[in-house]
Image: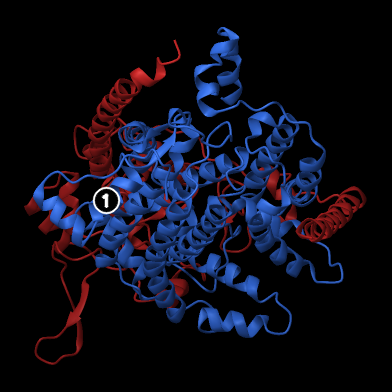
């Protein structure tokens, strides 16, 4: 499970020896996030986000469990119980604002974690399982967040649930029965709220389970690194503890300052005013928008406006789910033997354009379905799919990559034979 | 194989999206969508500043009490304050005796039961009661307000884009419709023109009509229309977010702690890596 030079766990205290022979839990921790896990020495700050996502999940579970002690999953009283938490429960406002902004925090660090994986080719062999398990986590997060947003039973909760479950109604023949089955009726109501609450409580623990698999799969080949070059010698690695525990501690501090600024000084910045109006099935809000972290996918959904063999709505639904599902094939679409984007100059340009397209989808998804936003999301949607399905497969066959360093330690320390001229190598890795 | 299939799927998605784009562009050129003329008359909230703006801003209890007075004497006739209890008034500086008196003298009594007969009855409010609803139900509210339903005000500042400045602008924004206003946007019967309201016309008549409509206690600013609108908007901001001061106080302490902890974490990170970082030199 690790490199041959990994430090071995040797219990010193007799109790730890006793424990190690019966339940080697300390050994597991030692080998996973302790001295026994050798990690490339050249990881940059982009490698902080995995740990931060784990931290976000812990924050969400802890605040969520306490909120559930005060929340009332009943269509008549859910909104009032949320206000009860905000006004009467001791520090209830803190729990709720931390939970709501914690969800945004979770998505921010997860998106950055995914971008890092894309740029440095962390999805490539031998880490395909790590990548695919990560996508499963991402999908579970989206389901959990969507159902959580429904729980306060405000206007946007209700109409968001109506619109998103309505997507299943676009499926030919079986669409409407599936929608009715999901919602538990013909429109979101009591049955919807209780099942969403139940699943919203369950799924985070499923996520925790898949995270264990994600880390397990990661620890087989070990972490990727900014050069994308495999670890070759003990010189290439440092033990996870204390080197990366210290770095992650600093990263967590910076991230928590951001989360605290949001939670304490702009708690409703990322929310929507309409969700402070109790759900009213008879009054449709002027603009129904999901939470910001769904905007790119909402923009893709709405980019398909013209029927073509299939109805436009169905195209939108297929493309929206497809935009994530195609990522499962990414390790086989991009066959370039070079992992890191730092050594693939052409890839880097296309990747930056992809980031711009995604940013446009983010903006367009939050706007009403009017011009020019529809056309902007159509152009960005075309590029989004073209990047993964057309550009990357061709690019990985034809591109000219830069020479890779012989090893991680060479890229960090410079090639001694070159008399210090190799200072350029670490610069390229940044 | 995956790549060939992916290529075809990619061409499919891109083709259909391009087809949508083409038709969108054609229709945008042939029949450009013009925004309704009403858009030109709609106005964004005026920039107004309050004592509670920003991380260091706090509620001003004097102002909140004046705002509460405006709510009690003007707004409460039609608008409820469902999530606020009389006891909460002690948080804006009223004494226990004052709170008890305010509750007991509230013009609308709290629904209860006749102890002897079990018939529905009412009783004077006590501090633990929430503010009583001004109407028995939505039908009664609509019947009394030309079929408009006066919204509850306990969350109004958070439930409207623009917050407190929007409320203040709306209260001060009633005016005669401009001469060039299209016929379709003119106020109908029982509606009133107000450019800050989303569709320009609302059922609520201007509630704050004249200077001195409410008499402030000595030592307070003169109750001009502007002052009353400002005070009641501040009061409603408090009603929507009564824990804001506590939140900002706690936020500053948390930030100081986090910055301190992060600096320590950074120093220990530098310390631990010191030897490794200098290995190459």
Residue found at x 34% / y 31%: A243
Residue found at x 26% / y 47%: B243
The spot of residue B178 in percent (x, y) is: 67, 44
The spot of residue B258 in percent (x, y) is: 28, 32
Q: Which chain is blue?
A: A
A300 and A124: which one is in front? A124
Up/down of B197 relative to B266, above or below:
below
A286 and A370: which one is in front? A370
Residue found at x 28% / y 54%: B72
In the visual, does A413 lie left or right of B79? right
Up/down of A242 relative to A270, above or below:
above
Q: Residue furthest front?
A: A4
A283 and A14: which one is in front? A14
Which residue is the site of mark 1? A27
- On the image, which quarter does residue B233 sit in? top left
The number of numbered badges drawn on the structure is: 1
The spot of residue B240 in percent (x, y) is: 34, 52
Q: Residue furthest bottom?
A: B117
Q: Can residue B207 be seen in this view?
A: no
Q: How crowded is mark 1: few (under 14 residues within 10 Å), some or many (20 or more)?
A: some
Chain B, hue in figure? red
Chain letter, disc 1 residue: A
In the visual, does A261 lie left or right of A165? left
Residue found at x 46% / y 63%: A144
Q: What element carries label 1?
A: helix
Task: Say how the picture is coloured.
Answer: by chain
In the visual, does B55 lie left or right of A161? left
């Amino acid at each position: 499970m690790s490199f041959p030079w990994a430090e071995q766990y040797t219990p010193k205290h007799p109790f730890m020896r006793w424990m190690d022979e019966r339940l080697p839990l300390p050994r597991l921790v030692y080998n996973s996030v302790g001295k026994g896990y050798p990690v490339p020495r050249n990881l940059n700050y982009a490698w902080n986000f995995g740990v931060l996502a784990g931290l976000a999940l812990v924050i969400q579970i802890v605040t969520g469990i306490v909120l559930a002690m005060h929340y009332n999953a009943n269509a008549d009283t859910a909104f009032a119980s949320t206000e009860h938490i905000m006004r009467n429960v001791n520090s209830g406002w803190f729990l709720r604002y931390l939970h709501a902004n914690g969800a945004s925090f979770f998505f921010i660090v997860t998106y950055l974690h995914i971008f890092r994986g894309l740029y440095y080719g962390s999805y490539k062999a031998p880490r395909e399982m790590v990548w695919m398990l990560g996508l499963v986590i991402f999908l579970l997060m989206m389901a959990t967040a969507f159902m959580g947003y429904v729980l306060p039973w405000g206007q946007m909760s209700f109409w968001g649930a109506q619109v998103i479950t309505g997507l299943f109604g676009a499926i030919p023949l079986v669409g409407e029965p599936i929608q009715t089955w999901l919602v538990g009726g013909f429109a979101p109501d009591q049955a919807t709220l209780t099942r969403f609450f139940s699943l919203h409580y369950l799924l985070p623990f499923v996520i925790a389970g898949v995270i264990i698999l994600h880390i397990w799969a990661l620890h087989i080949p070990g972490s990727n690194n900014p050069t994308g070059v495999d670890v070759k010698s003990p010189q290439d690695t440092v033990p996870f503890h204390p080197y990366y525990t210290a770095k992650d501690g600093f990263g967590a501090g910076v991230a928590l300052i951001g989360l605290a600024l949001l939670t304490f000084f702009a708690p409703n910045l990322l929310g929507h005013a309409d969700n402070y109006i109790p759900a009213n099935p008879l009054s449709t809000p002027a603009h129904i928008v999901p939470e910001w972290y769904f905007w790119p996918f909402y923009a893709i959904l709405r980019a398909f406006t013209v029927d073509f063999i299939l109805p436009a709505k169905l195209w939108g639904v297929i493309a929206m789910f497809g935009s994530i599902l195609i990522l499962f094939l990414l390790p086989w679409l991009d066959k370039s033997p070079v992992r890191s984007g730092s050594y693939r100059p052409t890839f880097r340009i296309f990747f930056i354009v992809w980031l711009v397209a995604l940013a446009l989808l983010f903006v367009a998804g939050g706007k009403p379905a009017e011009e020019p936003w529809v056309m902007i999301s159509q152009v960005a949607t075309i590029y989004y799919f073209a990047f993964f399905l057309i550009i990357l497969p061709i690019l990985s066959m034809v591109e000219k990559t830069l020479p890779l360093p012989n090893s991680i330690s060479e890229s960090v320390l410079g090639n001694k034979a070159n008399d210090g001229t190799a200072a350029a190598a670490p610069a390229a890795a940044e | 194989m995956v790549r060939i299939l992916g290529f075809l799927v990619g061409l499919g998605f891109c083709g259909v999206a391009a087809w949508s784009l083409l038709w969108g562009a054609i229709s945008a050129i042939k029949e450009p969508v013009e925004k309704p003329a009403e858009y030109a008359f709609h106005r964004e909230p005026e920039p107004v500043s309050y004592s509670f703006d920003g991380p260091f801003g706090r509620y001003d209890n004097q102002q909140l009490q004046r705002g509460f007075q405006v709510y009690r004497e003007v707004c409460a006739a039609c608008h409820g304050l469902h999530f606020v209890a009389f006891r909460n008034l002690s948080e804006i500086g009223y004494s226990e005796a004052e709170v008890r008196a305010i509750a007991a003298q509230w013009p609308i009594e709290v629904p209860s039961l006749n102890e002897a007969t079990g018939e529905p009855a009412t009783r004077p409010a006590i501090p633990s009661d929430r503010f009583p609803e001004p109407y028995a139900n939505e039908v009664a509210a609509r019947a009394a307000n030309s079929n408009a339903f006066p919204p509850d005000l306990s969350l109004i500042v958070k439930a409207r884009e623009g917050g407190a400045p929007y409320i203040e602008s709306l209260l001060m924004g009633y005016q005669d419709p401009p001469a060039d206003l299209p016929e379709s946007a003119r106020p109908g019967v029982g509606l009133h023109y107000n450019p800050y309201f989303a569709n320009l016309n609302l059922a609520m008549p201007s509630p704050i009509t004249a200077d001195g409509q409410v008499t402030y206690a000595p030592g307070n600013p003169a109750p001009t229309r502007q002052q009353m609108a400002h005070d009641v908007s501040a009061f409603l901001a408090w009603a929507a977010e009564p824990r804001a001061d506590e939140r900002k106080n706690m936020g500053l302490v948390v930030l100081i702690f986090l910055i301190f902890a992060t600096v320590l974490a950074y120093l220990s990170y530098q310390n631990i890596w010191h030897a490794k970082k200098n290995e190459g030199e």
